[in-house]
Image (tube, helix red, strand yellow):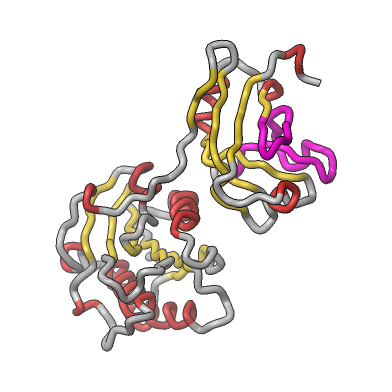
Amino acid sequence: MPVITLSTDFGAIDEYVGVMKGVILKIYPSVTVVDITHDLPAHDVRWAAYVLDSFYRFFPKDTVHIMVVDPGVGTDRRILTVEVDGHTFIAPDNGILTRVMAGGKVDRIFSVENPAYYLTPVSQTFHGRDIFAPVGAYISKGVDLSRIGPVIAPEEVFQLDLPQPRIGGGAGRQTLTGAVIMADRFGNLTTSIDEGALSEFMGDARPGDLTAEIKGCRIEGLSESYASAGSGKPLIVIGSRDYLEIAVNKGSAKHYFDIAEDETVTIAISERNDVL
């Protein structure tokens, strides 16, 4: 069963998402179109990069993933089609593909340049309708990527400079430092500290030995769920995206800490007799 996913920052008020679906279905009526989200923060390419990397693996191979967060629409920025681990991605060359390309096997990359697969005329402000949607439909229908445009080398693709977890501190007390990268609708704060980096840092330490510091607040222990802390209390937990999250049970960590993106989060391992 052919599948196309759609992720955008278009929202639900305007007709943009529905029109893209209409274009796809007119070209390929039997394809299944899955909405991932259309409420990505406007123009937030970094957030889009993390979201794209978080969901594509849950779809069948040969799925086409269209991601449109495109503040450069109408400029000379490129549109790319990229094959990674049997999935095909269509996105602007603005960094959205950074996490996907870093985390999987990149097979082929092409610049979208063949107007035979566009709608005409092409709007300068709505490439989602006139380029992304029809190109995605044709690829899903079986058109080989090589017919869409020329090959691009991986080093030619624009990459975001994303925050990476860092180990520091002295020999007596090391720390793992990351940053807040986004907040979901519940106010849970996803950090740049992934589960692998945290596990490596912990070594033989127990989850209860961890502490997290953010904006002068210290959180004790790695929780197993959002309900592990008391109602209204902050906690840290590995979220479904496999990144460390800061959350508040039945509340919003974003509001609790009055936090913006890039706020520093520091993880340490407490001496067991120091934990209250």
User: Is residue 167 placed above or below 135 in the rendered structure?
Assistant: above
Of all residues shown, which one is farthest toward the right? 231
In the rendered image, the quadrant that contains the N terminus is bottom left
Q: Is residue 74 left or right of residue 38?
A: left
Q: Residue at x 59, y 45 (%)?
A: 190
- Residue 271 sits inside the magenta stretch: no
What is the count of numbered marks? Answer: 0
Looking at the picture, how far across and down is residue 212, in whole percent?
66, 31
Percent position of residue 33, x then y: 45, 70
Q: Quadrant of residue 264?
A: top right
The image position of residue 149, as x and y in percent, is 17, 66
Q: Check residue 227 for magenta coloring.
A: yes
Left or right: 143 in relation to 238: left
The answer to whether 172 is drawn above or below residue 246 in the figure is: above
Give whichever of 257, 123 is nearer the camera. 257
Residue at image coords 41%, 54%: 60
The reply to whether residue 3 is in sight is no
State the residue in front, 72 or 35: 72
Left or right: where 116 falls relative to 218? left
Q: Which residues are magenta?
A: 212-239
Which one is in front, 53 or 184?
184
Q: Nearer the viewer, residue 188 or 224?
A: 188
Q: Which residue is at a point 54% across and 36% down the rendered structure image?
A: 178
From the image, which quarter does the C terminus lie in? top right
Task: Report x, y in % for residue 105.
Answer: 30, 43
Residue 251 visible to an observer of this rendering? yes
Q: Is residue 259 left or right of residue 135?
A: right
In the rendered image, which quarter is residue 186 located in?
Answer: bottom right
Residue 24, by quadrant, is: bottom left
